[in-house]
């Protein structure tokens, strides 16, 4: 068979493969599909579905396992606070994170603009099985203030996020129950999810329970509904516009927290996002970058 004829036959087949690739469906390039990390995808186990509580825990636990292995992150983005009348305030911020599968992750958020909030920083230490530790640095008085457990439910710098919301969900801090297999809409697309009911088992929480929607193929959290102490829907967190980093770790580049009761919103757009710094080459040294260490997540680091 002549080369031109072979090519005409192969092109439709190649296009079909790309079209139905799960990564291509999310706008990923062919290079990004390759897992460039040393972290393999865990094998999906055969879940026991007899008991809805046990089934829910199994799903939450595996989703957590699927996410592990990223080491550190650095991101930068824009934040828009929108009130019930549609008026908005814009901010920019940076965020760095350090993974700690056993001891808990660490996060440091810093506001970059506008001037009235520039330099404000928040540090979070996750404590698996209990309330997290939070500290706040205010440049006006150059002091680091510890956020008490009772204040974890307070608004974080006027946003619809509380200090409690700054941490990742830890499956060990909730009692779980499988509700059903469900779908959520993303424009014209329907995403298949596990719908899970979760009740916080730690103290100092503002929620009676939450409902978590976990993607049934990529195991990421597509949406979380938060219910207040009276059991009423309070907020919804939507994670959208996902990007696959190094062919292994999914990260949302758009996050929106909508207060269903006050009608206020906080919209986050991540313009720059780096996962596992050692997988990037420094422009100056032409060598792999160094990963972050615990030294970047101290109370002293807050005031720098």
Image (tube, rainbow, N blue to C red):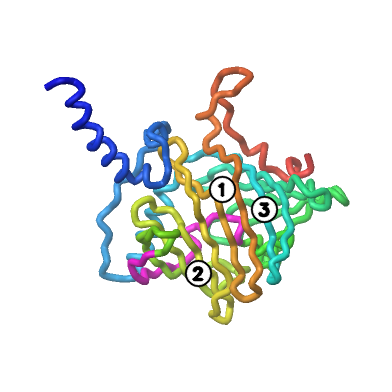
Residue picked out by circle 2: 210
Viewport quadrant of the C terminus: top right
Residue placed farthest to the bottom in the image?
A: 230
203 relative position to 243: left or right: right
Q: Residue at x 68, y 63 (%)?
A: 82
> Which badge, 3 or 2, comes first in the chain's sequence?
3
Mark 3 or 2, closer to the camera:
3
Is residue 178 on the magenta stretch?
yes
Please report contact status of discs 3 and 2: CB closer than 8 Å, yes or no.
Answer: no
Cα–Cα span, label 3 and label 2: 24 Å
Q: Residue at x 76, y 47 (%)?
A: 113
Q: Is residue 98 above or below residue 198?
A: above
Q: Is residue 3 above or below residue 237?
A: above
Residue picked out by circle 1: 105
Residue picked out by circle 3: 79
Viewport quadrant of the N terminus: top left
> Which badge, 1 or 2, comes first in the chain's sequence?
1
The mark total stands at 3
The answer to which image quadrant residue 150 occupies is bottom right
């Amino acid at each position: 068979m002549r080369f031109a004829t072979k090519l005409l036959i192969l092109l439709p087949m190649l296009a079909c493969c790309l079209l139905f690739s799960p990564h291509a469906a999310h706008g990923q390039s062919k290079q990004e599909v390759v897992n460039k990390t040393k972290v393999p995808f865990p094998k999906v186990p055969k879940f026991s579905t007899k008991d809805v509580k046990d089934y829910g825990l199994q799903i939450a636990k595996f989703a957590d396992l699927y996410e592990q292995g990223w080491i550190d992150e650095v991101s930068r983005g824009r934040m828009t606070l929108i009130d019930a009348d549609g008026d908005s305030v814009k901010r920019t911020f940076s965020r760095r994170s350090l993974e700690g599968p056993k001891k808990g992750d660490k996060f440091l958020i810093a506001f970059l603009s506008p001037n009235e909030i520039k330099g404000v920083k928040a540090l979070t230490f996750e404590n698996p099985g209990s309330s997290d530790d939070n500290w706040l640095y205010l440049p006006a008085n150059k002091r680091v203030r510890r956020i008490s457990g009772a204040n974890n439910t307070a608004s974080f710098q006027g946003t619809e996020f509380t200090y409690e919301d700054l941490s990742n969900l830890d499956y060990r801090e909730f009692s779980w129950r499988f509700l059903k297999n469900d779908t959520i809409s993303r424009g014209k697309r329907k995403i298949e999810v596990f719908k899970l009911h979760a009740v916080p088992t730690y103290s100092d929480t503002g929620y009676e329970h939450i409902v978590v929607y976990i993607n049934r193929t990529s195991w990421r959290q597509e949406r979380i509904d938060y219910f207040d102490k009276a059991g009423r829907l309070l907020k919804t967190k939507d994670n959208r516009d996902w990007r696959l980093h190094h062919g292994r770790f999914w990260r949302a580049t758009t996050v929106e927290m909508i207060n269903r009761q006050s009608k206020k919103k906080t919209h986050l757009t991540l313009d720059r996002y780096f996962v596992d710094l050692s997988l990037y080459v420094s422009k100056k040294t032409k060598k792999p970058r160094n990963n972050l260490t615990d030294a970047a997540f101290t109370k002293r680091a807050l005031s720098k």
